[in-house]
Image (cartoon, rainbow, N blue to C red):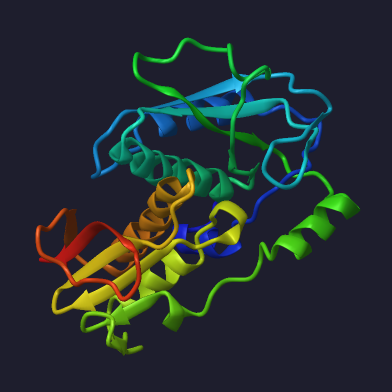
Amino acid sequence: MTMDIITAIKQRRSVRTFAPDPLSPSLREHLERFAEHTHSPFGGNVTILLRDIDAGSIFRPETYGMISGAKTYFLISTGSDDSSALSAGYRFEQVILEATRLGLGTCWVGGTFRKSAFESHDAWPAGESLRAVCPVGIPGRARFLERAMTSVMGSYRRKPFESLFYADGFRAPIPASSPLAFPLEMMRLAPSSTNSQPWRATKDGDTVHFYCATSNRYSLIDCGIGLCHFAEGTAHAGIDGSFGTLTEHPVPPRDWRYITSFTLR
């Protein structure tokens, strides 16, 4: 029996060690179809492919950690614009959560893939380039080094709710009684590069405004991941609303970049 989406959000973790068993044909077909039908309200250009790739017995990405035993990878390419980066995170995190629901292990890996087994595996649509890869398969037993790296990088730690989400133009905390507290908590649990959690938000009336607090090359992809969790939380809670870019929004207390707003219907 597969788990529900909220359980998947709460139980998802980055898996870096995989069992040698290949994906079954039915699982593979399901994941490919699911990825094809993911969606994003932010536009842009994103391509998601599932491929068997021999990246070596141990793949050492430029981000922390090592990937061991993986033979099947998702490849994610995007356009160079901000909307594409945001949509890449939003769309592919849907795939991550679906794989988690099915009992599979995954791990977002962003970086530069020059001179790697991934770089020339596919011809990407014009204007797109490979931005991330993700091993997928049956989780293996975590190696000591993997557990140590997870502990060092704080992969299971998250910033407190009140340091990420605000109300009344960043002047007050969001009350626990707010119906939007639940989807924002799901956003807080989202994965991000080195657990940076770059998303910030403030609730004003029936609208939540979202901002990006960091400016590294993964920040917008990370924010897309977080917004996916927020959207899954609103859907689960029966909250009706939509994303949109507003010309007027609260000025953040720091140099945070405005991304989008969610307005209740």
The number of discs equals 0
The image position of residue 121, as x and y in percent, is 58, 12
Q: Is residue 1 visible?
A: no
Work out whether residue 90 or residue 10 is closer to the camera in this orientation and state it.
Answer: 90
Q: Residue at x 35, y 71 (%)?
A: 254
Q: Quadrant for residue 162, please give it.
A: bottom left
The image position of residue 1, as x and y in percent, is 57, 52
Q: Is residue 171 above or below residue 235?
A: below
Q: Residue at x 19, y 72 (%)?
A: 250
Image quadrant containing the C terminus: bottom left
Q: Quadrant for residue 72, please give it.
A: top right
Q: Is residue 101 above or below residue 85?
A: below
Residue 156 as seen in the image, left or right of residue 83: right
Q: Residue furthest right?
A: 144
Residue 24 as seen in the image, left or right of residue 96: right
Work out whether residue 203 or residue 196 is closer to the camera in this orientation and state it.
Answer: 196
The image position of residue 104, as x and y in percent, is 64, 43
The image position of residue 67, as x and y in percent, is 75, 38
Q: Is residue 207 visible?
A: yes
Q: Is residue 174 above or below residue 33?
A: below
Q: Residue at x 58, y 11 (%)?
A: 120
Q: Residue at x 46, y 46 (%)?
A: 93
Q: Is residue 147 above or below residue 35?
A: below
Residue 213 as seen in the image, left or right of residue 251: right
Q: Residue furthest front?
A: 255
